[in-house]
Image (tube, helix red, strand yellow):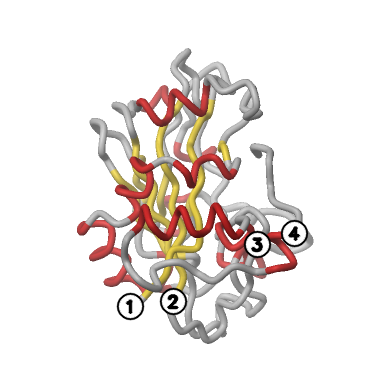
Amino acid sequence: MEAWNRLWNDPTVENANKRFIVDHKIYLEPAFARVAIHPVVQEIVRRVIGDFQLAGYAVVATPRNGERAMLLHEVPFHVDHCVYSDVPEETARDTFVCVWVNFETMAMENGPFVLAVGTDKWNIGWNFFKDGKRPNLKVSDMKWPATFNVGPAGTTAVYSGKTWHSASTNASDIVRKGLNMNFVPRHPIDTLRRNPFDLCALSEANYATLEKLIGIPDYLIRRETQFAETPMKRAY
């Protein structure tokens, strides 16, 4: 929480009315690196995608963005596979995994993460929609066991790029706090896309600093020069 507060109160980090902080200063915080290499985190990622590398993380910093907690039938489910792959979900041979750790108690009014557990087995993505509109079906019709990730500090959601999921409305006056980490297969087949908001865009010096904080050889995806030349400095 000390690391989270340093970023939130840093005037050079844009965070007002945002959901996540991706400023490269997040990679200089030892506390976040320790979460990214926690043995439990490593084990759950390995169970989902096998041998892996850390692609990047974002600091969850979501202020109040609604007047009431989201109801189940209102959840705008989507998939994120395309963030790291250009191959459609139904034919992609691999995907990434995200681990979302809550730093404080998460109740319904705080905007918990929502998972449609088991939907990664369906291999369906945006092609499930027709004419750009969501199908006129309820979650109960699809028999998806949707789960709101509520619980005490440390409660964690784990989902693959093919899992239907969503954030929900933060109707409280408490900023939602946490760390959202993305991991990709160490030897990707179809999950080959890299992004300027990931650690591959770090400067050489900051990348070296993160390597020391992580302390595990080859744990990070490699730097990408085309991104590193214009590093991200803003939140999104």
Spatial distance from mark 3 to mark 4, Cα to Cα? 13 Å
Residue appearing at x 63%, y 72% in the figure: 193
Q: Badges 2 and 1: C-beta atoms under 8 Å apart?
A: yes
Q: Upstream in the sequence, badge 2 or badge 4?
A: 2
Q: Earlier in the sequence, mark 1 or mark 4?
A: 1
Task: Point out the image quarter for the C terminus.
Answer: top right
Question: What's under tag 2, amino acid-wise?
Answer: Pro
Provide the secondary structure element on which disc 1 rests. loop
Q: Is residue 165 above or below residue 162?
A: above
Instruction: Provide the residue designation for mark 1.
Output: 50
Task: Tell me the quarter of the picture where residue 149 sits.
Answer: top left
Front residue of 94/3: it is 3
The tag on residue 185 is: 2
Q: CA distance from mark 2 to mark 1?
A: 7 Å
Amino acid type, label 4: Glu
Residue bearing mark 4:
229
Q: Are marks 3 and 1 in contact (CB under 8 Å)?
A: no
Q: Which residue is mark 3?
A: 195
